[in-house]
Amino acid sequence: MKISFVIFDQFTDLDLFLPWDLLNRVRVVGKHPDWQVDILGTESSHLSISGLRVPTSGLIDEVEDADAVLFTSGKGVHPVLHDQEYQKRLKLNPNKQLIGSICSGALLLAALGLLKNQRATTYPTSRKLLAKYQVEVVNEPFVNNGNIATAAGCLACQDLSAWIIRSLLDESMVQTVLNSIKPVGLKAKTL
Amino acid sequence: MKISFVIFDQFTDLDLFLPWDLLNRVRVVGKHPDWQVDILGTESSHLSISGLRVPTSGLIDEVEDADAVLFTSGKGVHPVLHDQEYQKRLKLNPNKQLIGSICSGALLLAALGLLKNQRATTYPTSRKLLAKYQVEVVNEPFVNNGNIATAAGCLACQDLSAWIIRSLLDESMVQTVLNSIKPVGLKAKTL
């Protein structure tokens, strides 16, 4: 299985790194050696909003090879919303791939036409803009329609990651992964 | 203010990246331009347990200049537990600095003699080893003794980050930062 994240300059750190860590745990903790997680972009590295330079492992053109594609968030999503050349490179197939977004990454899904007349969620500061794409914007942490899902609020990346793992593997692996990051000594659900 | 993370090869991604994101939000969201967060190591970059190469901004010798120093976790902590040269470079001053650890990072604090006869927490798989350093190991997400704190279970990095921000700034900034990562539409405490 191959999961690909799409990042850009000025991406929100945690919206990449929380699901990145969780999804890699399928291989690291869950012992699935053929479970691969990639970070794709338009450059060999991208700079996060906190100032961390993160290497990419491939170009965005590779999204077509992934079983699941996740779009991260941040200020850097705005320039690509009107970049037709960029969007043409994203050869997605929602009939065969799981496609998800976190926070303002939903804007790119909308620009690609993937959320039209659908319910979806995004970070509060992006709600008005998302609604302009004929999207029914709701105030929920996670919204799933078939092979497409949107999550909002960094910690909701737990829901997004759980959806990917449940869809491609099973609920047992979801619990293995989510339990491994819980605060020690707490029994309550962390989300 | 300057906060420094100490990493090494085979560090646990989320134990760096969750507090890294939260603490940077003091500058990015909280508008404190003089709030600096660094990542220190022994090389110009270190490889995470998930396989991400993360650049460092300085060497571990620089910990003495920080207001707060946070030790991350992972398999890579074990080689330095017996490395006297490495430990000599960590010129820490618990009378002037806040010093914290997440998960197995507590082992390094213990090796440095900072947890002797104190209560502390660590990831379950490190409990036995931590207890060998004359530490009273408890099953709690966060333990604070004066200027030293230990957190365990990745999501407890929220407690650790809150402690740093509360100690160096105030509770209002803690809430600003923690609220900015909550899942949208949820009112419950996320930790």
Image (spheres, coloured by chain):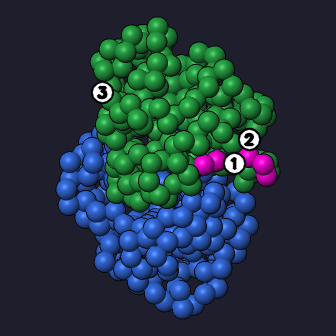
Chain colours: A blue, B green
Chain letter for the residue marked with disc 1 in the picture:
B
Check disc 1: other Cα within 10 Å, few if <14, some if 14-19, many if 20+: some
Q: Quadrant of the N terminus of chain A?
A: bottom left
Q: Which residue is mark 3?
A: B125
Magenta-tinted stretch: B33-38
Q: Secondary structure at mark 2?
A: loop
* CB-based contact (under 8 Å), mark 2 and mark 1: yes
The answer to whether residue A79 is magenta is: no
Q: Which residue is mark 2?
A: B1
Taking depth in this image into account, of A88 and A119 the one nearest to the observer is A88
Front tag of 1 and 3: 1
- Find residue B160 and report its horizontal and vertical position in percent: 58, 31
* Co-location on one chain, circles 2 and 1: yes
Question: Sequence order check: which comes first, mark 1 or mark 3?
Answer: 1
What is the CA distance from the residue labelled 2 to the residue labelled 1? 6 Å
The earlier-in-sequence mark between 3 and 2 is: 2
What's the distance in space between the residues labelled 1 and 3, CA to CA?
32 Å
Amino acid at dot 2: Met
Judge from the rendering whether residue B177 lies leftward or rightward of residue B113; answer left or right: right
Quarter of the figure with residue A29: top left
